[in-house]
Image (cartoon, rainbow, N blue to C red):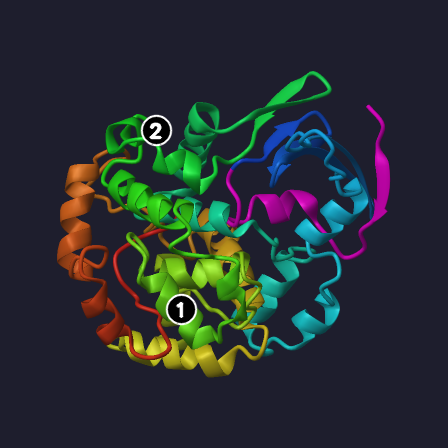
């Protein structure tokens, strides 16, 4: 297996892949194997150098001149190695919580994900912990994706919207999606039919893009902001899930227990600066990794009353707390205001 060397200063591969952005990469030996669009890549890190190899890709049609992108360019783009990380981190506010997160997450970068894959994955993330989202992603890939062999390993691409649109809700439920199956199928049908053009939405302003995303089945404000940050590279998007809500309340509003969702949203939109999406990701990973282990923050990623897999109980809580956000997106948007974020029921652990 021929490995291409790629300069990657100020980058932590393992932390980036484990930070709750993507959910399908597998640790194999000294590196990781995962899919980047139609290509499967093996990548490992040695100091400031990545070593990568690539296999797969959609086969060219007869007479086509389509060529696979150079693996170095694919990897550089996917891991956003062109982001000026030092300058981004220097733009964060200099408070104790943010400073601790910046130090802990040194080298973590925001991945540029394929738009459909990111949208579909985060629709599946509702009320799920990271480990459960990985299981769902794996099941979807193995059931509906395409196998790609690299060295002695097999990885699967994420199924296209058209492929999922041809399935059924019952088939999707076999991937442990629960009530999310209905929403994923409906959104896949919109995207697969061409009625929704995710690529064309790249030209929209942030507010318009958020509104379009929130109009899709299964997409509320938090998921929309995740997709904006991870797929559309809108680095000012600041998703507020239970981890971030907890950090904001305990670290920034410790004596204001009744700080409203709107107050938290307004604070996040002004306090964390122009790269607040990065600040959010650092706080998120720091909270669910370092602070949880030290007991600094309690794990609210799954409601204590409902063990993993109890979708019926979790669905009742989701409806009662968020006001049926998925089924009633209009109400959700009115409650969240123009900026979009809603602090609501647990969605991502």
Contact? badges 2 and 1 (CB < 8 Å): no
Q: From where the camera sits, is residue 85 visible?
A: yes
Which numbered disc, 2 or 1, marks the residue that appears first in the sequence? 2
The residue positioned farthest toward the front in the image shown: 63
Residue 243's disc is none
The secondary structure that dominates the magenta segment is loop
Describe the element under mark 2 as helix, strand or loop: loop
Q: Secondary structure at mark 1?
A: helix
Query: Mark 2 or mark 1, which is nearer to you?
Result: 1
Residue identified by numbered label 1:
210
At horizontal 35% and vertical 58% (from top left) the residue drawn is: 242
* Depth check, front residue: 16 or 151: 151
167 vs 288, left or right, is left
Q: Can you give x and y, in whole percent of width and height, for residue 177 in the image?
A: 30, 35
Q: Is residue 205 above or below residue 294?
A: below
The region drawn magenta spans: 1-23
What residue is rendered at 42% in x and 31% in y?
140
């Amino acid at each position: 297996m021929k490995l291409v060397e790629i300069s990657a200063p100020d980058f932590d591969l393992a932390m980036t892949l484990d930070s709750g952005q993507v959910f399908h990469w597998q640790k194999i030996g000294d590196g990781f194997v995962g899919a980047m669009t139609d290509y499967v890549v093996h990548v490992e890190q040695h100091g400031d150098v990545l070593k990568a190899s690539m296999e797969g890709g959609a086969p060219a049609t007869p007479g086509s001149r389509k060529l696979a992108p150079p693996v170095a360019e694919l990897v550089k783009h996917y891991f956003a190695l062109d982001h000026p990380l030092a300058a981004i981190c220097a733009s964060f506010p200099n408070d104790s919580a943010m400073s601790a997160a910046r130090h802990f997450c040194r080298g973590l970068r925001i991945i540029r994900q394929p738009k459909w894959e990111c949208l579909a994955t985060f629709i599946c993330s509702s009320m799920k912990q990271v480990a459960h989202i990985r299981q769902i992603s794996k099941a979807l890939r193995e059931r509906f994706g395409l196998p790609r062999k690299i060295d002695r390993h097999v990885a699967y691409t994420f199924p296209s919207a058209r492929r999922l649109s041809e399935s059924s809700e019952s088939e999707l439920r076999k991937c442990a999606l629960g009530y999310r199956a209905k929403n994923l199928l409906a959104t896949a049908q919109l995207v697969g039919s061409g009625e929704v053009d995710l690529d064309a939405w790249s030209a929209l302003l942030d507010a318009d893009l958020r509104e379009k995303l929130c109009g899709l089945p299964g997409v509320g404000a938090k998921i929309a902001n995740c997709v904006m940050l991870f797929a559309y590279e809108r680095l000012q998007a600041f998703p507020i899930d239970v981890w971030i809500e907890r950090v904001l309340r305990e670290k920034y509003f410790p004596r204001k227990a009744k700080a409203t969702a709107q107050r938290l949203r307004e604070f996040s939109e002004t306090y964390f600066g122009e790269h607040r999406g990065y600040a959010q990701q650092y706080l998120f990973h720091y909270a669910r990794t370092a602070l949880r282990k030290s007991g600094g923050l309690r794990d609210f990623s799954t409601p204590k009353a409902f063990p993993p897999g109890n979708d019926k109980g979790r669905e009742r809580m989701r409806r009662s707390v968020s006001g049926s956000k998925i089924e009633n997106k209009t109400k959700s948007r009115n409650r969240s205001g123009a900026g979009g974020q809603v602090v609501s029921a647990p969605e991502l652990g």
